[in-house]
Image (cartoon, helix red, strand yellow):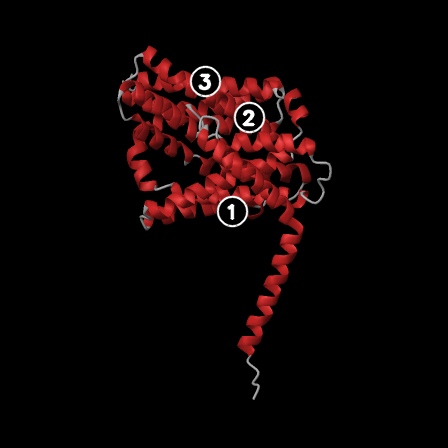
Amino acid sequence: MWCFSPKIAAERYFEKEWRKLSMNFLKKNGAGLLLCLVIAVPSWFLGQAVPVIGGPVFAILIGMVLTLILTKKEPFLPGVNYTSKKILQAAVVFLGFGMNLTEILAKGKQSLPIIISTISTSLIIAFILYKALKLRTNNAILVGVGSSICGGSAIAATAPVINASDEEVAQSISVIFLFNVLAALIFPTLGAMLGLSNEGFGLFAGTAINDTSSVTAAATAWDGIHGSNTLESAAIVKMTRTLAIIPITLILAIYRGRKEKSSEGTTFSLKKSFPYFVLFFVLASVVTTVFQLPAEVTAPLKELSKFLIVMAMAAIGLNTNIVKLVKTGGKPIFTGFCCWLGISLVSLGMQHVLNIW
């Protein structure tokens, strides 16, 4: 005898609706998501093989070349746009699982004066050049933040907050990549010429090189030459810098909200401007710290974060006009160079003030 069950009926209804939503999502975004994934996989392995360049740069380059070949882009656009925005934000959230706040602050507190000085220097230089060179606001912000905090990860976190275009993101990532490679190649020799100690080089690499892969490459090269173990200290300094993502993105969100209020004559809403993915990044860090999550749990999540960034950069490459990028790249490159030089000099200067060098 058949008996009506409200519970079973509700479960079937929600299951049906979920399938419907899933099918609609895949129908709309599936092609673009798959294309970004196809680019991300080889880019990831190329980044593993050549870490000084890194997967995100390979993904952007492949995406920019592929978009010149694609004749019918319309079926891919929704998924590509979804990847460049939502997948990028998810990558930042998963990045938080690699942050044990207690450990980072305990080991990285010595470097805090240097980190604060270098971040301030980069942002001030970017602001001055934004005014002097009449740079686009978003370019100046992304290059300044990317140079001072943690390269691609900082740009990934900042771009959605300031509503940066994919071309602006690609241009900023390219600028950061250029000086990352130069730093990874030059700094070990430069550090030896300057007579830096192992501790001093760890601080120098951790504060003056933008991207984690390039910090690792430079510190590993130094360790190979000097038989030391600076890699751990350089990585901790770098992770301490990464925490600056939190206040920077919140300040930028408030700034953008107030700017929109003044231009549109509307009331400022923190709720509307607040970058909620940064809140989830903080929560992920807190969970890792409070529950002391083991490396077996956090390591795969960190790797997932890195892969999602590569996938998002593929989408950004697909949305970027390489010809326009080259034509308009002079000012951002000069800004990146000035930020990089300023950070390097301040990092060394602060070491001298603190009697480390």
Q: Is 247 placed above or below 225 here?
A: below
- Point out the frontmost of discs 1 and 2: 2
Which of marks 2 and 1 precedes in the sequence? 2
Q: Where does residue 218 sit, x and y in percent of width and height? A: 38, 23
Local crowd size for mark 1, using a 10 Å CA cut-off: few (<14), some (14–19), many (≥20): some
The three-letter amino acid code for the residue at tag 1 is: Tyr
To which residue does mark 3 refer?
342
* Quadrant of the rendered image containing residue 117: top left
To which residue does mark 2 refer?
174
Secondary structure beneath disc 3? helix
For residue 168, side relative to residue 148 (left or right): right
- CA–CA distance between discs 1 and 2? 27 Å
* Quadrant of the rendered image containing residue 98: top left
Between 109 and 228, the residue placed more toward the observer is 228
Marks 1 and 2 in Cβ contact (< 8 Å): no
To which residue does mark 1 refer?
276
Q: Where residue 68 is drawn, which disc sits there?
A: none
| Residue at 60%, 70% in the rendered image | 13
